[in-house]
Image: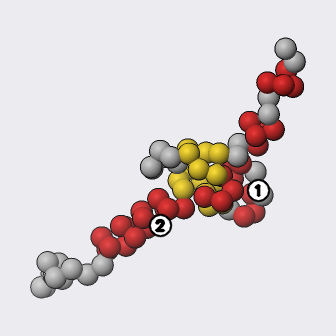
Amino acid sequence: MDLDEQINLEHLLFVDRQCRSCGRIKNLLEDFYLTRKSRGYFPSSYSYECKECTVKRIKRKRNNYTYSPKFDYPDW
């Protein structure tokens, strides 16, 4: 058995990645954001949270910071 037959190019390029939030395996290039464009397009420069989970997290966090009628400024 030849070593070249056991290793595919996909294994070396990390085409798929598992999202830390939802646990689903998705395409690295299409479904994950780059952390910084200056780092290049290496697999290590992509985030570990998929785009869908990132959008959900940001929406949830922003809703927590919006004004709610229960909150009143202190009356000094």
Above or below residue 3? Residue 59 is below
Q: Amino acid at mark 1?
A: Tyr
Provide the residue designation for mark 1. Answer: 41
In the image, taking residue 64 as reference, residue 19 lies left or right, namely: right
Judge left or right: residue 73 versus residue 38.
Answer: left
Disc sitting over residue 30 in the figure: none
User: In which quadrant of the rendered view does residue 9 lie?
Assistant: top right
Mark carried by residue 55? 2
Position above or below: 70 against 29: below
Q: Is residue 45 visible?
A: yes
Judging from the image, what secondary structure is the residue with disc 1 in?
loop
Quadrant (top left, top right, bottom left, bottom right) of the C terminus: bottom left
Indicate the position of residue 58 as horizontal and vertical percent values.
43, 67
Residue at x-position 60% and y-position 58% = 31
In percent of width and height, residue 71 lies at 17, 78
Which quarter of the image is occupied by the N terminus? top right
Secondary element under disc 2, as helix, strand or loop, is: helix
Residue occupying the point 16% across, 82% down: 69
Between 1 and 43, which is closer to the camera in this rendering? Answer: 1
| Mark 1 crowd level (few <14, some 14–19, many ≥20, 10 Å Cα) | few
Q: CA gap, disc 2 to disc 1? A: 22 Å
Q: Determine if residue 35 is in view.
A: no
Q: Give the number of callouts.
A: 2
